[in-house]
Image (cartoon, grey):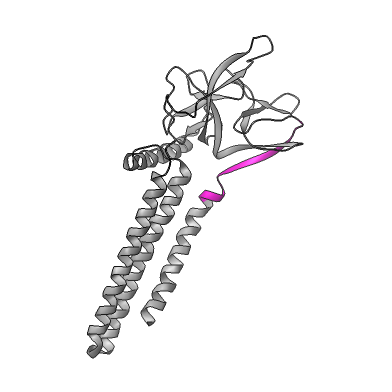
Amino acid sequence: MKCNNRAGWVTGLLLAASLVVVLPSVVLAYTATVYSSSKTFTIGTLMAIDNSGQPVPAAAGSNYVGVVTKQSDAAVEIADSGIVQVFVAKDNLGSIESGSKIGFSSVAGIGALLNTSSTQVGVSNENVDSSSSRWKTITIKINDNTAEQDIRVALIAVRLTKGDGAGSANASGELIGTVQRAAENIVGHSVVLWQIIFAAILGIGGLILAFGLIFSSGREGIMSIGRNPMASKVILHGMWRVSITSIAIMMAGLLFAYLILKVGSV
């Protein structure tokens, strides 16, 4: 049918436009700088630049530059903005909520919930409660003059903020935190950013496709009835089929979006 062909073009363009808006958020998750270094650092480590210009694990008061995102034999990639994985230490509270501010711990290279004497590194992008299996025990030395000790750490998604944490970045983190908490209330457990992004693509894409089909079919149907009133019964029957198909597409999109959020508990 002519109306179906036009509907396909319209909805295809609308869906493509929505993906153009959403996909950059997926592809450009963070921005980073590559530093030359012969040393090996673990992804998720907070980093600073020492007096000789070399990257080292960052502590409170150091020349903090970002978080390790990639490592090679001769270089290390350090992100200074966006959403990355960061090691955080477990404090007395233990639980980290989406939107919690992250600063430095007493261990170089590892973050913790922000305290009054620390500098803000970023904002947590997910929930990790005190009983989560994601807390792991590691053995480290805080410095050369101390004995080894065990600490509990977890690797979590953090939205980095520059400097001491600009207000706009905090507002952005809080907005994402609000969206995550709403999603968590729907599915009953914590969700991470990638789940929200892909659920939004499916849910919004299904809605756009469904309403595009209904709108295009209705407009073409009315025009066709005006040109050929004798065929109104056949035309209306076709419009009803398109409407039912559109509703099915919309429900399928919402169902798959829900399943993406529902899969896995973090």
- Left or right side of 72 for 172: left
Quarter-wise, where is residue 181 in the image? top left
Magenta segment: does it hold 31? Answer: yes
Location of the C terminus (image quadrant)? top left
Quarter-wise, where is residue 142 in the image? top right
Residue 18, horizontal then vertical, whole percent: 45, 59
Location of the N terminus (image quadrant)? bottom left
Residue 235, horizontal then vertical, whole percent: 27, 82
- Left or right side of 212 for 222: left
* Residue in view at x 35 percent, y 55 percent: 254
* Residue in view at x 63 percent, y 24 percent: 58
Quarter-wise, where is residue 92 in the image? top left
* Residue in view at x 42 percent, y 51 percent: 199
Residue 62, horizontal then vertical, whole percent: 63, 22
Magenta segment: does it hold 262? Answer: no
- In magenta, the rendered stretch is 25-38
Looking at the image, is 178 positioned above or below residue 204?
A: above
